[in-house]
Amino acid sequence: MSLFKPALAAAALILATPALAEEPITFEAASGETAEAFQGAFEVPENRADPDSRMIEIGYVRFPATTDNPGPPIVYLAGGPGGSGTGTAERQRFPLFTEMRRHADVIAFDQRGTGLSDDAPRCKSSIGGDDGQRVSDADITAAYRAALEECGAFWKAEGIDIRGYTTAESVQDISALRRHLGAETVTLWGISYGSHLAFAALNAIPDEIDRVIIASAEGLDQTVKLPARTDAYFARLQAAVNTQPAAKAAYPDIAALMRRVHEKLDADPLLIELESASGEAIPFLFQRPHAQMMASGLIADPDNAVYLLQLYAALDAGSAEAVKAFMGYFFEPGEPISLNPMSTAMDLASGVSPARLAEVREQAETALLRDYLNFPMPHILGVWPDIDLGESFRDGPAGDTPVLLFSGTLDGRTYPEGQAEAVAGLTNVQAVTVVNAGHNLYMRSPEIAVAMHRFMRDEPIGVTEITVDLPDFAPE
């Protein structure tokens, strides 16, 4: 990875255990800022249930503590699934990674199948690629299920045991990292799917966890979100828009606008012409499911919801230009379906309980985005039946481990109601509501870092609510 450059003046570190020595590096963030750090790795079985499993390498970057009396190592758990800890440290949260060193070593941990720990190839199936035809919801589901069947065979032929790419295995990787570092316990710090992994760790290895900081929590039975709660998010977005007179005048009824656009697209899809990387013209028939998938990707944070509103206003007016501007972020026109092994397998393994699945399917019939927020879950459930971790995995967590939870009121992916449910079995939770924040909230206010530092020092965090500014929702 290009972000790692040999350090000029960092002494090699021998860990407290007889583990491999780490390599000193200079870690460079996208901003150009740098920090002296250590890059390390250790080996684990790809599938611990298989005594003949191949070994895979798990990599990380360790930012050493700046205090003389460090606490347990702080292990960052990226979201996704599929996000990289080192990739997160490279981007906008770099200042927070360096700040947290005042408490302990901070570990940018690359979960199996990500970043430094990724040796499983992406699969490009033979399914799809003809984007000029009408498709139904059932057609889309059938295509992804066929692609998953094909990709399962591809990964097996590549020697990848896809059954090893589960949250339960990643929990054991955290335990192996703790032993590798020679630590009695670790602090977990994560977001979104990273909180899902932290909850699973609280269930499976509670004595190895000192404390937990999470944001945008996803419970163990919340891999598939409830469509009715997505509708409730749009009501909160409308309330936020209504605080701005110009935005309120432009978008007086967001839900009605979206339903109107979906009906228009069902009746008369929008044929647009896109250009491939080689300059070839590609016809793309933009339909209602495509709009719902785009919307699902634009509601995580209020800044992106600005573009959602502009997109739907343009579609309502019959304009294709806004669609063209966003296509590259969501689709690969002219290309067959391709799948990432880690993110696909992790979500399939965590699964969904039968009761929740029944709720999802019932609510999807009338919800604004149907069940596309979760796509391709639960659409591909059952294609690999032997990977599901089972109902016992989806219970909990419980216990008295100290937990600090940040929730954004305009989070369009993990909703406040669900986040409260996710921690309901934990008895030592301090919760902070970040008003007007979305899913990616850690850098939205310096008060968030202040609360984190107080929590790490076992001090009262002194706040239950932090308010941040809204973006300007009015059209340009």
Image: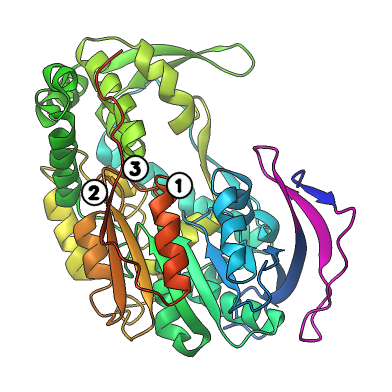
The residue that label 1 is drawn on is: 443
Q: How many marks?
A: 3
Tell me which corner region of the image, top left, top right, bottom left or bottom right, holds residue 21.
Answer: bottom right
Q: Secondary structure at mark 1?
A: loop
What's the residue type where badge 1 is placed? Met
Q: Is residue 9 magenta?
A: yes
Q: Secondary structure at mark 3?
A: loop
Residue 399 place in picture, x, y as percent: 33, 86
Asked whether the residues under the numbered discs 1 and 3 touch, taking CB atoms below 8 Å apart as contact, a structural biologist would say: no
Return the residue nearer the eye: 41 or 344.
41
- Of marks 1 and 2, the one in the foreground: 1
Q: Which residues are magenta?
A: 7-36
Residue 105 place in picture, x, y as percent: 65, 70
Q: Secondary structure at mark 2?
A: loop
What's the residue type where badge 2 is placed? Thr
Q: Earlier in the sequence, mark 1 or mark 3?
A: 3
The quarter of the image holding the C terminus is top left
Residue 318 place in picture, x, y as percent: 24, 10
Secondary structure mostly seen in the magenta stretch: loop
C-alpha span from label 3 to label 2: 11 Å
The residue that label 3 is drawn on is: 300
Asked whether the residues under the numbered discs 1 and 2 touch, taking CB atoms below 8 Å apart as contact, a structural biologist would say: no
Return the residue nearer the eye: 10 or 461.
461
The residue that label 2 is drawn on is: 409
Q: Tell me what residue is drawn at x 47 percent, y 30 percent.
A: 329
Callout 1: 10 Å neighbours few (<14), some, many (20+)?
Answer: some
